[in-house]
Amino acid sequence: MQAIVLEKHDPEGVKQTTVPAPAPKHGELLVRLRAAALNYRDSAMVFSEYGRAFRTPFILGSDGAGEVIETGPGVTRVGVGDRVVLHYVVDWTSGDPTDETTRRRLGGPMNGTFAQLVVVPEHSVVRLPDSLSFEHAAALPIAGVTAYRGLFGHERFAPGDTVLVHGTGGVATFAIQLAAAAGLSVIVTSSSDARLADAHKLGATHGINRKATPEWESRVLELTNGRGTDVVFELAGGDSLARSVRATRMGGTVLVIGFLAGMESTLNLPEVIRKMIVLRGISVGSRSDLEGLVNFYATTSQRPVIDRVVDFADALPTLREFGSGGQFGKIVIRINGSENKR
Ligand SMILES: NC(=O)c1ccc[n+]([C@@H]2O[C@H](COP(=O)([O-])OP(=O)(O)OC[C@H]3O[C@@H](n4cnc5c(N)ncnc54)[C@H](OP(=O)(O)O)[C@@H]3O)[C@@H](O)[C@H]2O)c1
């Protein structure tokens, strides 16, 4: 089968090549992938940006959807022919995470979804409604689940609360869409007026251009009548975190999710303490969060935001360019042909 393999953590170490097809063992499924999606994590794997390397070689790709074509002995949850989306943290099914349940992940250390076939444990998939295409489903596991867990997994937010979201990429567009659907007021920061206009169409209430307004936290305070936002999707890290704390109301929550602007931040601790801010690290979510997200799309006419779909043959060049920004939502890879049901 064709796959994108990371042979070593180096830009020269990633190849699209032919590898042996895998076979399911006890409790496992063989899935023919129909779509995958790109994440910041895939390029971070190539450059070993998380500061740790996995044992190579392995197949890249953490988001994917397809159909079950073979089951190993003992499989009872799903059957051949079922359309499924794959849960990326394969052993985290529900509840609180543990070291054990968060170890195995698709696309490092396990073989991932940039391939024609993948073997996964049966407990790690969610069945898809006919109304959700493989391409839309493939967008969900990392970015969608992260946004879902941030909004619904810990603190309770109520209609009328305000959420601040940075950027207009994968996690951000899910956060905007889900928060707007839950009745929250959404403030978005972006480097682009055109993408702010698109965010508005998606449900954002206010947009702030970060380039034109580098001290955007003052504008957030103005927009919230001086009170501050209830929750922030902090996707940038670096210097952005301190600004986000300033933009947050007393007792509000900052969801620490990404580090597009830097892996280290300096915080004014008396400010965090005085305002009793909750700093909540988010690392994707459980299969049950993915089920909640699939159910959201099964019961509304909304769909995940896809910037573009590329063919598998073009996946490697697209992966090499990923990270330069400019997309609105997710970039999806079409594998083995793919139907496009809405
Ligand atoms: N913790 C988790 O579970 C988890 C899960 C998924 C992703 N992440 C992390 O979250 C971050 C975003 O991931 P993603 O998949 O949404 O990325 P993405 O799809 O590549 O989107 C990135 C977008 O963020 C905006 N951006 C870029 N640099 C920025 C900066 N310095 N300050 C504010 N916004 C900036 C840009 O939007 P504009 O051009 O509109 O500004 C860019 O298009 C990454 O750091 C990723 O590693 C974490």
Image: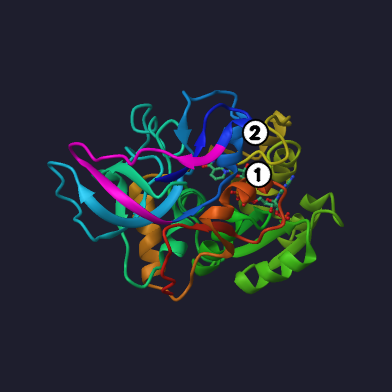
Q: Magenta includes 23?
A: yes
Left or right: residue 25 versus residue 338 is left
- Looking at the rendered structure, which numbered label has been put on residue 63? none
Q: Are marks 2 and 1 in contact (CB under 8 Å)?
A: yes
Question: The C terminus lies in which quarter of the figure?
Answer: bottom left
Q: Is residue 266 above or below residue 127?
A: above
What residue occupies the far front of the structure in this picture? 18
Image coords of residue 303 (percent x, y) = 49, 69
Of the 4 image quadrants, the one containing the N terminus is: top left
Whole-number angstrom distance, CA of label 2 to CA of label 1: 8 Å
Seen from the viewer's position, the closer of residues 98 and 78 is: 78
Provide the residue designation for mark 1. Answer: 320
Residue topped by disc 2: 11
Q: Indicate how the structure is coloured in the image.
A: rainbow
Residue 288 belongs to magenta span: no
Tell me if residue 175 can be seen. Answer: no
Of all residues, the one furthest to the right in this rendering is 212
Q: Tag 1 or tag 2, which sits nearer the N-term?
A: 2
Above-or-below relation of 53 to 241:
above
Secondary structure beneath label 2: helix
Q: Position of residue 288 (x, y in %)?
A: 33, 50
Q: Is residue 217 left or right of residue 177?
A: right
Question: In the displayed structure, does residue 113 sit left or right of residue 179?
Answer: left
Dot 1: within a 10 Å radius of its alpha carbon, few (fewer than 14), some, or many (20 or more) residues?
some
**Amino acid type of the residue tagged 1 in the rendering:** Arg
Q: Is residue 218 visible?
A: yes
Q: Which residues are magenta?
A: 15-34
The one nearer the camera, 329 or 281, is: 329
- Which residue: 43% across, 30% down? 109
Label 1: which secondary element:
helix
Residue 185 image position (x, y, % from top left)? 61, 65
